[in-house]
Image (tube, rainbow, N blue to C red):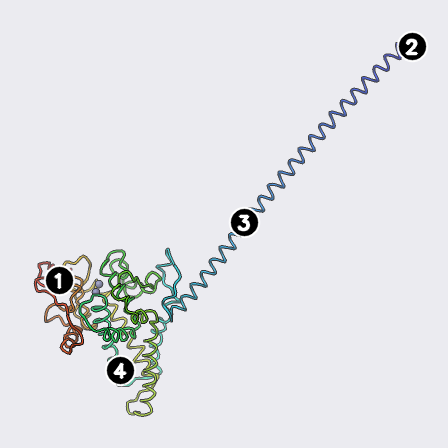
Amino acid sequence: MTHDRTAGQGSLQAAQLEHAVSETLHEARRKVEAAAHQVERGVEEAVGNARARMEHAAGCVEVAFDDTVTRTRSLWQRAWVAVVNWFDTSASVPIEGPAADRIAWLRVLPFIGLHLACIGVVWVGVSAFAVGVALALYLLRMFAITAFYHRYFSHRAFQTSRLLQFVFGLIGASSVQRGPLWWAAHHRHHHRHADQPADLHSPVQHGFWKSHMGWFMTPRAFGTDFKVIPDLEKFPELRFLDRFDILLPVALAAGLFALGNVLERYAPSLGTSGPQLLIWGFFVSTIVLFHATVTINSLAHVWGKRRYATRDDSRNNLFLALITLGEGWHNNHHYYPQAARQGFYWWEIDITWYVLKAMSWLGLVWDLKPVPARIRDARTRQRAS
Ligand SMILES: [Zn+2]
Ligand SMILES: [Zn+2]
């Protein structure tokens, strides 16, 4: 009996033990499983994070690559358009922001070349004939700029035939100051905004160099605003001159070179040659003509006397009037821009006006707009400032 009880107790303990062991094992498995699950989740999360980071990095690389490609392409495109613009000004690429006001060196390389070519006088020598041709071309082209580019195309200060309009458009275009449409559009803009921030060549707003030449070397000034010149845009021959504004300068340069060669052979006593006539007649004459013309932008708004209290800083200046054939009476001109004359009184020398008057006697030009005496003598005088 005792033996049986002992055996019974033993089997009970064994069963309890087995139960405890099985429970422990079960618990251990559960823990292991939970830990494994946790590890699995952790790994998954880490892999997920890593993948997201890699995708983000790949995205960044792609954006940077696209950006570089776009930039490089636009750089090349700009360079290409700049070179095409030397020959055909209709090619364009939109340039906004600060780049629009920075000098586009590649585009203006021919303009810099014009200056450098003047150094050629050192090699080609000089003759009275070559200097005479340079002076004659200076005067003829200055007249084309002042009488036609300025007073006719920009201000409609007189009338002429379509033929003469074109002839003086051609002569003006040989001055390397772009075509008549570009010139007139920018000039009308100047009168509308004279010496205000929008005026591209105001020395008061932007300083001497920018007003003298920096302004047209920037993309902001390369185009022509056709909206302000509907009266000129309708002439296809003028649009052609504007689009291919290199043609006339090249034709003049080539013509002078050929003439010089012919004269060297058949009139050696003149002492000239092809290269000499090219350098003096084209390069030197054009550069002096250019810098004289643009003094009206840079100097005629700061140097001289103000007879009229215009809203701008325009001045009257005898010296500038002499070198530009009459444009130096710039305060008069800003006061009453529609007149064909800029010297308002007989002592204000205005050679362009005298020539226009003579041309009107020949019937070449007509309807020269006068300056009414009541406007000329209006009491808006103020002391020179
Ligand atoms: Zn002005
Ligand atoms: Zn004007």
Q: Is residue 302 above or below residue 142?
A: above
Between disc 4 and disc 2, whose residue precedes?
Answer: 2
* Residue 109 in which image quadrant: bottom left
Q: Which amino acid type is marked by label 2? A: His
Rendered image: mark on residue 59: 3
336 or 304: nearer the eye? 336
Callout 1, which amino acid?
A: Arg
Q: Position of residue 273 (x, y in %)?
A: 33, 86
Task: Tell me the residue that label 4 is attached to.
Answer: 133
Residue at image mark 2: 3
C-alpha separation, residue under disc 3 versus residue under disc 4: 66 Å
Secondary element at tag 2: helix
Q: Which mark is residue 307?
A: 1
CA gap, disc 1 to disc 2? 144 Å
Mark 4 nearby-residue class (10 Å; few <14, some 14–19, many ≥20):
some
Disc on the earlier residue, 1 or 3: 3
Residue placed most toward the observer, 266 or 132 = 266
Percent from the top left, x then y, of residue 122? 34, 81
Spatial separation of the CA atoms under disc 4 and disc 2: 148 Å
Rendered location of residue 26, percent (x, y): 75, 25
Q: Disc 4, disc 1: CB below 8 Å?
A: no
Mark 3 or 2 closer to N-term? 2
Q: Residues within 10 Å of mark 1 (few under 14, many from 20)?
A: many
Mark 4: secondary structure: helix
CB contact under 8 Å: marks 1 and 2: no
